[in-house]
Each structure stands twice: as C-alpha cells, then as structure tokens.
Image (cartoon, grey):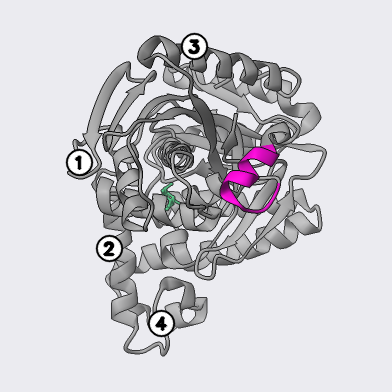
Amino acid sequence: MNPSATPVAQSASSQSLRRSAEIRKLFRDLYGGDCRLFRAPGRINLIGEHTDYNDGFVMPAAIDLHCCVAVAPTANRAVEVYSTNFNESRSFDLDQPQPRGDWSDYVQGVAIMLEKSGYHFPGAKMLISSEVPMGSGLSSSAALEVAAGVALLDTQDTPCDRVQLAHICRRAENEFVGARCGIMDQFVSCNGRAGNLLMLDCRSLEHSFLPVPEDARLVICNTMVKHAIAGGEYNIRRAQCDEGVRLLSCVVPGLSALRDLSPEDLEQFHELLPSTIYKRCRHVVGENQRVLAAAAALEEQDLQRLGKLMAASHQSLRDDYEVSCPELDLMVELANVVEGVYGARMTGGGFGGCTVNVIASDAVPEFASKIASAYEARTGIVPEIHVSASPLNSNSRFHQRSVALLRSASNDHAQIV
Ligand code: GLA
C-alpha cells in the first residue's frame, strides 16, 4: 500500500521494473537459473457486494497492487513454491494433492484444477511476492490464484482463455481451499482493464467496461482490521441466500437464484421468510438494482447519484447483510464529511478490510491526510490510504506477450512482467 497517500502514477513503471529485477534475483538466489515472471492484480469493488454468488451484478476494478509469480519448469511432477510474504517454502506433488490449510493451498488448488481441466504440468519451481495486502478485502487470494495460474500455464503448451482461467481459479477456491466465493474476484483479476470499472453479469458473464470519470479518483482506505472469508460467516451468508431461494421458489415461478427475485415479489411473500433470511434477501435484491443504477449514473457522469447509491449499499451491508464492522462504519462516516467525497462504502466480503471512496481529484491530498488522522485519533490504528493512479494504473508494454500466452482480448491485467 501507499501509506503516504500520494498518487503513484508517475513512478509506477520504474517501481515495477525494480520489483521485477528484485524478484528475478531472489529466484536465482533461491533456485539457481532463470525464471519467467507473471503478475495479476487485486481489486476493489465499487458496488455490487455479495451479489456474485446470487447470479447478480457487480462493478469491480483491477487495482495497481499485484501478486507476482516467478516460475521455471522442472520435470518431476513436483511443485516447489516460496512466498516472500510468509518467508516460507512449501512443496506438493501434482499426483497426490493434499490441502495443508495455508497460503500454498491457493497455488496447489489452481494447479490441481488446471490438471482436472485437461492441462498437464511437468513440475515447477515458483516464487511468489504479493503487494496486495492480505485479509483486507482487496482479493489477495484471487490475485495469487490468477498469477499462479498464468505462471503454471506458461510451463506447458495448451492455451487457456481468461474466462476459463477465472472459472478454474474460482473452482480452486471453492473446492480445494473451501471458501464458497463467487466469480467476481477471479474474473476481474483476469479481465480488468486499466482505467475502467468492469460491469459484470455474474450469470451470463456478459461484461462491459465503464471508464472512471477523468476528474475523479478511487481511493482505498484500509481499516487494518483483518478478515478471513474462508471462515464461517461468508459461507453462512451464502447458505442463507440459498435458503431464501428455496423458501420462495414454490411461490415465485422460475426462481433459481436471488437474481430472479423482484423487490415486489420479495415484499409480497416476505412472511414466508424468517426475519434474518428476509433481511439477507432484501440486501441482495436491492444491491442488484443499485449496481444497474450506478452503471447508469456513471454513464451520465452523475457522481452525486453514484455516491448516494454507494451510501445505500453500505447501509444495507451494515444493517441487512450484517457484514460490516465498527471500523468500516467509522471509516465511511469520516469520509462522508470530507469535502470532495462523492461516495464511500466498504468493499469486498466485509468483517474488516477496506473502504472504497470516489473523490474529486483535487480533493484527494486533503482527504488522505484528514481521514488518516481522524481514523487514528478515534481508533489508535494507523490506516493505509491508497490512491489509484490516474485513475487506475496500467502496464501496457507487456500486453503483447501476455495476449500471446493467453490468446485473449487486449488491454488486460494478468500479464507477464
Ligand atoms: C469476496 C468473494 C467474492 C464476493 C465478495 C463479496 O471477495 O471472494 O466472490 O462474494 O466477497 O461481494
């Protein structure tokens, strides 16, 4: 993160070149020999929270914080992997998958799910270095999965497209790691486009890109309270949504996910639902509508309207879905009284992590210093404030090679570095 809250655009490419050189050197020191280097971004979600696994709509964006994976093939069907973040090595056998309950499960899970999808790896040495803060709601796990997936794919010859890779990475998290996440994080890490929000229909996977208005910035405020979505609450919310669908499917024809439920049907039949299930459904139904309204507001460059939708989203996540926490609520409350702020809300799974803020560009420096000192004064915690570059950073010089590797569309985010 960039605690100084200075826009990072100008120095981003030289920083990333320095980082690449450091990772290559570490790889040589650890394993000997050369490597190839890949990276995938974390994400923020502007609006559309806990809607992806209900077949609904989301509006995330890739951010300029990445997970880098260096890789070289071996021939022994073993994968050795070192994490600079944990300062730990792990190894696993591609023929005998065995979850260990730690960070390496994301890598092992992706390798195993790629093999189940028909890819075959000789074996690999890998080194991982991520700048996406963990447990912060910025999807460090999807960034790791996608970067590891792209790196592993480089050790074999069969092409894989970006949508397929997103599915495989999600499957790794659902079936190997045990978190029942939706497709949003992996999809945007594979397909995000610099400077744009990704409007995604999580049922059809139809998507479009919405530019972030020139005079606005997306600012991430990290409460520094860690969450763990693999832990129970996330899966409980999913089960509650499934229960809502089950209870209403006998009275609402064609209801296969909360995406299909209209606000009118929900109100008409709400007595069939226990109150907690009703509140969970109300969040999802309302949030889907807010995403569609936010897309229209962005198209009209109506940032005031966008801000109101973000406020309603946060309130619904706090009161109906109950996935916020006092620190997130405080960060949003503090942001809302700073001049130049259009909107603020929690982003990601919740229970800690970050808020996303839409702010007039010229108000950003003052916002960053005001919110950091106010949050610290109230909590005793020093937050991290990250300002996305203008509005999000890209590294397009690497496009050609990554496109060749994945045989996919241009201007994307998971790439060779
Ligand atoms: C986590 C999951 C996503 C999504 C969000 C909440 O980030 O990985 O699939 O459900 O929470 O919107």
**Mark 4 or mark 1, which is nearer to you?**
1
Which quadrant does the C terminus fall into? top right
Residue receiving disc 1: 99
Q: Which residues are magenta?
A: 399-410
**Does the CB distance between marks 3 and 2 fall below 8 Å?**
no
Q: Position of residue 67 (x, y in %)?
A: 49, 30
Q: Quadrant of residue 267?
A: bottom left
N-terminal of the two: label 4 or label 3?
A: 3
Residue at 38% x, 27% y is 126
Kindly report the distance in space between the C-alpha atoms of the residues bearing marks 4 and 2. Answer: 16 Å
Judging depth in this view, the residue of 269 and 166 nearest the camera is 166
- Dot 4, how many residues are within 10 Å of its Cα: few (below 14), some (14-19), or many (20+)? some
Q: Secondary structure at mark 3?
A: helix
Image disc number at residue 239:
2
Whether 25 is drawn above or below 55: the answer is above
Can you tell me whether the CB of the residue at mark 4 lies under 8 Å from the nearest atom of ligand 1? no
Q: Is residue 145 magenta?
A: no
| Among the two numbered marks 1 and 2 on one chain, the one whose residue lies closer to the N terminus | 1
Closer mark to the observer between disc 1 and disc 2: 1
Give the residue pinned by disc 3. Answer: 25
Nearest the viewer among 136 and 403 is 403
Q: Earlier in the sequence, mark 3 or mark 1?
A: 3
Helix, strand or loop for disc 1: loop
Residue 256 location, x and y as percent? 39, 79
**What's the mark number on residue 227?**
none
Please give the residue where the numbered disc 4 appears in the rendered image: 255
Q: Secondary structure at mark 2?
A: helix
Sooner in the amino-acid sequence: mark 4 or mark 1? 1
Between disc 3 and disc 2, whose residue precedes?
3
**Kind of residue at disc 4:** Leu
